[in-house]
Image: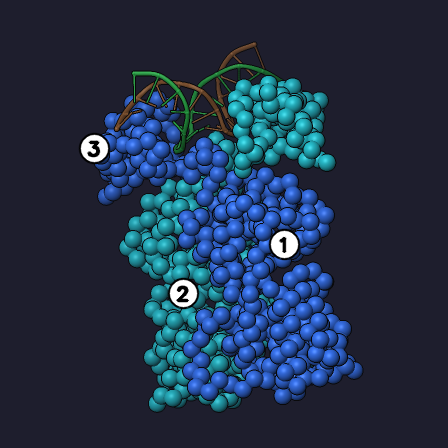
Chain colours: A cyan, B blue, C brown, D green
Amino acid sequence: MTIRTQATELAARLPAGPTVREREPVAGGRVTRDDVARLAGTSTAVVSYVVNGGPRPVAGATRARVLAAIEQLGYRPNALARGLSMRGVMLLGLVVPDAANPFFARLVHAVERAAARRGHLLLVGNTAFSPSAEEHYLDAFSRLSPAALIVVNSADTPGIRHVLSMLDCRVVLLHKRVIGFHGPLVIGDDYRGGWLAAEHLVGHGRKRPLCLSGPDRESPVADRERGFSAALRAAGAPVTSVLRSGFLRAEAMRATLAAIAGSYQPDAIFATTEEHAHGVLAAARAAGVRVPDDLAVLAMDGLPEGEFAAPPLSTVAVDIAGFADMAVNEALNPGPGDTRVTVFGVRLVPRLSCGCAPAPARTSTSTTDV
Amino acid sequence: MTIRTQATELAARLPAGPTVREREPVAGGRVTRDDVARLAGTSTAVVSYVVNGGPRPVAGATRARVLAAIEQLGYRPNALARGLSMRGVMLLGLVVPDAANPFFARLVHAVERAAARRGHLLLVGNTAFSPSAEEHYLDAFSRLSPAALIVVNSADTPGIRHVLSMLDCRVVLLHKRVIGFHGPLVIGDDYRGGWLAAEHLVGHGRKRPLCLSGPDRESPVADRERGFSAALRAAGAPVTSVLRSGFLRAEAMRATLAAIAGSYQPDAIFATTEEHAHGVLAAARAAGVRVPDDLAVLAMDGLPEGEFAAPPLSTVAVDIAGFADMAVNEALNPGPGDTRVTVFGVRLVPRLSCGCAPAPARTSTSTTDV
DNA sequence: CTGAAAGCGCTAACAG
DNA sequence: CTGTTAGCGCTTTCAG
């Protein structure tokens, strides 16, 4: 019905247009500002004024006619043309290593929500931890003239640093530092997280703590390790070497199995990411090691899913929603001190895996307690 | 170094340009095709020819000069201008209910990968199951002239159906049907998945199976329920009513707890989504019900994470990567029969939660066995 | 093989 | 308050 009406309207009007060459119904807003102006009997500028509420005022009657025409034709401004003219689109680009990873999935979701709240759309790219892929997205996204790019760096290479520095687009680094980068940076208090973890484990009387971390010593996991070791040292507890594995649960599980079979018999494990922790839990189960009795497990990230692990995972949580919101804020507010680095606080969420007793009157309702 | 070189180059050349009005170094590719043409001493058309490899041929020498100029200036074509001119951008839009949900997270990741493989970037929008949010993204995305939109519908409302039908942009529906929509559709074989689940549970000798499903009877979970019930009926097993809960683990847990406390003592539960299954597992744990001994649990979706649940989750898997690839295929190949619906096969992945014995020489390496 | 020029749809001075 | 017009940067037809 509405469709027919519009089609008819257009058909009747097109012949009069300036450039009618039987154009096919291709993608892209068929109805343009010109059509609206013609129907409303005004100039195209006026249409623009009412659509954007400026920069010039428009008489009430005129505005009404334009609005009516817009409504009648189903006019929807073309974002590309607008962006080309305005030198910018209400768009944000987000680059992450792997959107399927629970932590990044949460981050993608939160950033999108924050962007939407501010009227922006979101582009997402997965680098799979490949520097070249990251460079690709940085380049490709920036060509669309987005308001800014939010990047969770995958690997701190010279190539990335170079591209990052000479990109003609605002960039905010999230979650992970890149040496030599001087733009806005939003990270969690990873060092403190590791520190809290160590303190807590020591407080539980654990004597042989182990840290299971990522494959290489890049932030943020490296900072978590360092905080953990430092707190251990400060407590006069034995400082152990770190165990490393990839970010997949299966890899963490394998590494843990080896550690359990090894000579240093850990009685506590701090997993620097929650994915690692799930691997640890699986390994303990497979090896018949009881958690938390024989092995206390403490993770970091603070995902809601941890509540449903067996046993429920104790973790050092980052407020992902706030984290993302801050990043989007930085991205959209070109504040003065653009070298500003924001450090987000972390919070210990004790559940059962570290040895803490179950909360008294717990109803297990929280999925959003992070 | 490279930066300085460019800047100098530009500064020296700008004064000669046609429209130099002290423009600030704003976002958007500063260097344009005009600069390249000037430096290379050719027309702008030729630059376009070499950049796009057509539509007219270019002499080797000329092409070389242009390439050199591009390199020297660090020219990067503006995607908006290109898109405006070409009536389309190498962009795909993906609308999902919730990118933080493990299943959709996987889907977002897979779709992005598939899009990237074909040279496209991806926009992502979260509807939070709100029809109006979905309409918003459909509208906003399409204004950017993307190649197509891939939509995982959130709720089948008249409003959505209307917007969907009159959108001036190619749309592919993924994972969930929408009545009255006649464009390309890519879904999993949900009915069959439910059927397989029932057969398997009956095969394990379970007599009191229960189906835990989503909050309302929309596809795909409704199809899974139907397949489940049908197979049960076919097997002469008691047909039960379905238990419903939201898609969050906590909600599923609550519902399961209630069921366990109820009169119909289920000895098997088919969870129509893997999130539900995790809630079931947690409930069983909390209630002291042994899985699979007292209660067999079989899920559907087939996420790698299920392998790490306690006990490892048996599930009916959808090949998400293939699923996404198919959707992107449909989105990018405007095949003739655009009403085509592709149904993706499913596969039972028996693990321990349903009562199947652990595989003989299992090394627990698979994280990607789906 | 190369260049001039007409758009793509929208914004924003700059006159009326 | 409203209309004219010159771009935004790129593609492509149509002459040379």
Residue A302 locus on image (x, y percent): 53, 69
Label 3 SS: helix
Rendered residue at 34%/57% (across/down): A131
Residue A21 locus on image (x, y percent): 52, 24
Q: How far is disc 1 from disc 2 in space, using C-alphas?
A: 36 Å
Q: Quadrant of residue B302?
A: bottom right
Crowding at dot 3, Cα within 10 Å, few <14 / some 14-19 / many 20+, comes out as few
- Chain letter behind tag 1: B
Task: Say what amino acid the circle numbered 1 marks.
Answer: Asn
Q: How far is disc 2 from disc 3 in space, using C-alphas?
A: 50 Å
The answer to whether marks 1 and 3 sit on the same chain is yes
Q: Look at mark 2 in the image and give the residue it sits on.
A: A220
Q: Look at mark 3 in the image and give the residue it sits on.
A: B61
Which one is nearer the viewer's eye here, B93 or A361? B93
Q: Quadrant of residue A51?
A: top right
Residue B230 visible in the snapshot: yes
